[in-house]
Image: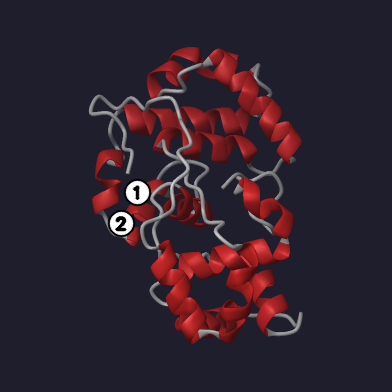
């Protein structure tokens, strides 16, 4: 997996389209075990999760997109990239609060982005080691950064580290997908979701992805940043 450079700088993000190494095995196992997955997975052919390669850029983009529309998030992100073309921690810190605010970011989001950059620059997070750390250890580091909660950390595990067994119970799209596909649209509790997902181990990420796609099939070919049901404008 791509990692941050040793000096704390992150390279410019390049989205590399690759099939997660576990994807085909997971599909076969899920279809064997779960009657819903047996019907759902074939509907999407060879489509698969597409990861985002650079940790710092992935997290910065997520912070920019929180609680705003996708259109507003895209506009703010493009402005930020004009101000910080390489989108490295050093470049963001050098730009400072005033220049980031001029990109259309709120005072709070500006503070979040600067805190993220500072964590990477000062190596208070161990991005180069994340691919060797377990899921909960990565989450524990990420939630120390302002603006990053467990849901954002779990999306990072899925879309940057490509972890195979993430179950984001705070994700509205996952809960809706379980409701529609397993409970005929009836309300679903976290306990219900855990019970259904027990059959997906150790491929809960893959099952979650197919449930997202079941809610928005047209989005699947583009492997969108925001999964169906995600908080408005929150980038995954």
Q: Secondary structure at mark 2?
A: helix
Q: Is residue 225 above or below residue 213?
A: above
Q: Nearer the viewer, residue 15 or 177?
A: 15
Residue 224 visible at all: no
Name the foreground residue: 24 vs 163.
24
Find residue 64 and report its horizontal and vertical position in percent: 60, 34
Q: Residue at x 38, y 25 (%)?
A: 11
**x, y (%) of residue 108?**
60, 33
Viewport quadrant of the N terminus: top left
**Viewer-side residue, 128 vs 114:** 128
Asked whether the viewer can see residue 66, the reply is yes
Distance CA(mark 2)–CA(mark 1): 7 Å
Up the image or down, 100 lies above or below 198; here it is above
Residue indicated by mark 1: 141
Vertical arrangement, residue 16 with respect to residue 219, above or below? above
Residue shown at 75% from the left, 35% from the top: 71
Q: In the image, what residue occupies the spot 51% across and 30% down?
A: 113
Q: Quadrant of residue 65?
A: top right
Q: Residues within 10 Å of mark 1 (few under 14, many from 20)?
A: some
Where residue 169 sits in the image (x, y, percent)? 55, 68
What residue is drawn where x is 56% and y is 62%? 209
- For label 2, the residue is 137
Q: Position of residue 102 (x, y in %)?
A: 65, 16
């Amino acid at each position: 997996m791509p990692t941050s450079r040793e000096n704390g700088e992150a390279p410019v993000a390049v989205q590399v389209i690759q099939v997660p190494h576990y994807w085909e095995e997971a599909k076969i196992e899920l279809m064997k075990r779960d009657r819903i997955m047996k019907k759902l997975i074939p509907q999407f052919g060879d489509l698969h999760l597409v990861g985002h390669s650079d940790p710092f850029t992935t997290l910065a983009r997520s912070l920019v997109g929180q609680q705003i529309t996708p259109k507003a998030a895209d506009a703010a992100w493009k402005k930020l990239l004009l101000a910080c073309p390489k989108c490295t921690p050093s470049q963001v810190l050098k730009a400072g609060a005033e220049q980031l605010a001029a990109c259309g970011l709120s005072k709070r989001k500006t503070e979040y982005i600067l805190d993220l950059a500072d964590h990477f620059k000062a190596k208070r997070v161990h991005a180069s080691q994340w691919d060797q750390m377990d899921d909960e250890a990565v989450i524990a580091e990420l939630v120390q950064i302002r603006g990053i909660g467990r849901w954002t950390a779990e999306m990072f595990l899925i879309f940057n580290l490509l972890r195979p067994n993430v179950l984001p119970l705070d994700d509205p799209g996952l809960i809706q997908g379980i409701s529609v596909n397993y409970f005929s649209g009836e309300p679903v509790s976290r306990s219900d979701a855990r019970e259904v997902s027990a059959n997906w181990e150790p491929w809960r990420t893959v099952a979650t992805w197919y449930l997202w796609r079941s809610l928005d099939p047209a989005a699947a070919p583009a492997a969108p940043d925001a999964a169906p049901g995600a908080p408005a404008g929150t980038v995954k």
